[in-house]
Amino acid sequence: MTESAATVPAASSPDDAGIEGRSTGDRVYRVLTLACAISIPALLGFIAIEILIGAWPALSKFGFGFLTNSTWDVGAGQFGAAPMIYGTIVSSVLALLLATPFALGVAIFLSEFAPPWLRQPVAFLVDLLAAIPSVVYGLWGIFVLLPILRDTVMPFLASLPVLGSSPLFSGPAYGNSLLAAAIILAIMVLPYISAVSREVLMAVPRSQREAALALGATRWEMIRDAVVPYARSGIIGGIILGLGRALGETMAVTMLIGNRAEVSASLFAPGYTLASVIANEFAEASTEFHTAALMACGAVLLGVTLLVNMLARWLVGRVGRGGA
Amino acid sequence: MNAPRTTGSQRAAIERTGRTLGRRRLTNSIMLGVMYVAAGLATLPLVFILVHLVREGASALDANFFTKMPRPVGEAGGGMANAIAGTLVLVGTAAAIGLPLGIGAGLYLAEQGSRRLASTVRFLSDILNGLPSIVMGIFAWQVLVRPVGHFSALAGGIALGVMMIPLVTRTTEEMIRLVPASLREAALALGYARWRTSLSIVLRTAMPGIVTGALVAVARIAGETAPLIFTAFGNQFWSLSLDQPMSALPLQIYAYATSPFEEWHRLAWAGALVLLALVLIISLVARFVTRSRFGGGHD
């Protein structure tokens, strides 16, 4: 991310002790900072182990069926996470579909052709979107977004010629729904996707643009044929980073998705996500087993976000290395 | 890496010759227009949210909000004094954990890490940063609430503190790398021990940047709700004890927003306005710190 940092070499390597060798102070300092650095991998491991331990009773009883069973019945002690996994995936993917065009639009606008006087304010406003706490999005969603969806957007979607009669937009429009969660998630991940994309686009060498323009390309052709392809893997990385955020986003989704453990084809139907079932039920979990099942949801979420984030970092890093 | 791209542009160039210039220019203006509209639309939700928040929040905000305790259902008035204090205590606890560990790790990565270890830690730090905050919550519950048998502010503070570590580590490392090597060499040449060079010369030079990073990290965790739901839990009464459940602004907003009572909704808006103002003020101070010391930096 910081190309400038790479030009300043780390001042000292660990092996070149001074003429007089290391003093006690140096040794203490080194051990202390090393301990701080090691605390990061240690914490990550500790988190994973503790959550697996907490989830173990549920995982060992249900095994792989925990992921595929769609019954989540607290009273009967039946716990299957399929509805949550379904809700998590549908709301996140839909959010990305909604957010990506706008995020890329902003990123390209800011890096390629925004007039200087517009660049700063727009970048600031988009950054500000990332600073708003999740619970504030949820509050706004409950009192502003849900009524709009219920009274305007949902009836409109249901009245569309062909799509309207599809199962996608069927059922009563209460407001609380997968659709509402996806829209709020789209607004929330937009700044992340656009920030990463913008950084990657700005890392595209000038020569790439100049060459395209010199060949007679219009500005749009330059963007489409010379700039975006060069930055492609980084942009995809940014989108996947957004996916990681969306998968784990908790509060706003919990407040808007309706919190019902069902798998429904309709986007108007209430749903549940892995994160929101934990937020909603954990504090009131009455049985040992309920807690363990919620922990297991956390373990699934942890595993998925780990994979998604690793993939994203790898993709973004690729442009950084090949680019500047 | 370069070969396919060139072919792509060449192919595009050949395609282009087949079309008239006028059509290409039209496509150009249309697409640039689309980008303008996309950028405009992307900032719209923010404007909507801010306008609504200020309108609803300001009408419910008064001195009572800051000085009074929450009232039971049905009684008008009341405030969030305990939640505001709770947020400050929780953020303070988090900073007490996140700052030293983060700065220490950043120092190690920037100046003495072996390349392998440093890049591994850097990578894992990014991964830790990407973990969902709710996962941090159940982790803190499992380690600090379950064994004790009751909710505590300490568990919430620690959950938030762990979230701060990767943020602080990253900015500290970046800022320390920006310190010129000549400065460090000069100190070493004067006979300073390495640790004193690092702490009193390098760290001090990088301090404004690190302070900015720390403030940005604080701004991010101050609005977190998910890690607190089953750690700090919330509290209707005044409590500053780390051993007891504690209220916090985000928790109170969540509880009030999802309640069926009109009066509580009003307070939730006021709370949201105060929380957002707190976060924005911290962010602005962070920008100001960097600017004033570095003499009008970038961004």
Image (tube, coloured by chain):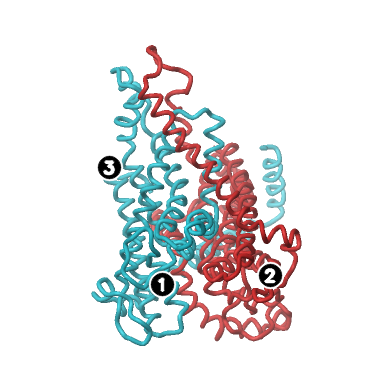
For the point 38% across and 45% down, the residue is B99
Q: In the rendered structure, find residue B292 and report the number of the disc placed on it.
A: none
Residue that label 3 marks: B293
Residue that label 1 marks: B253
Circle 2 Cα neighbour tier, 10 Å, few/some/many (<14 / 14–19 / ≥20): many
Left or right: B283 in relation to B22: left
Q: Hue of chain B?
A: cyan
Quadrant in the rendering for residue B70? bottom left
Q: How many marks?
A: 3
Element type where label 2 sits in the image: helix
Residue B90: image location, x then y, percent: 37, 58
Q: Amino acid at mark 2?
A: Pro
For the point 42% across and 77% down, the residue is B256
Chain name for mark 2:
A
Closer-to-camera residue (A64/B191): A64
> How far apart are the two marked residues, 1 and 2, measured between alpha carbons?
28 Å
Q: Is residue B49 above or below residue B17?
A: below
Viewer-nearest of labels 1 and 3?
1
Residue A322 in sight in this render: yes
Circle 3 Cα neighbour tier, 10 Å, few/some/many (<14 / 14–19 / ≥20): few
Letter of the chain shown red in the rendering:
A
Residue that label 2 marks: A83
> How far apart are the two marked residues, 1 and 3, measured between alpha carbons?
37 Å
Q: Quadrant of the N terminus of chain B?
A: top right
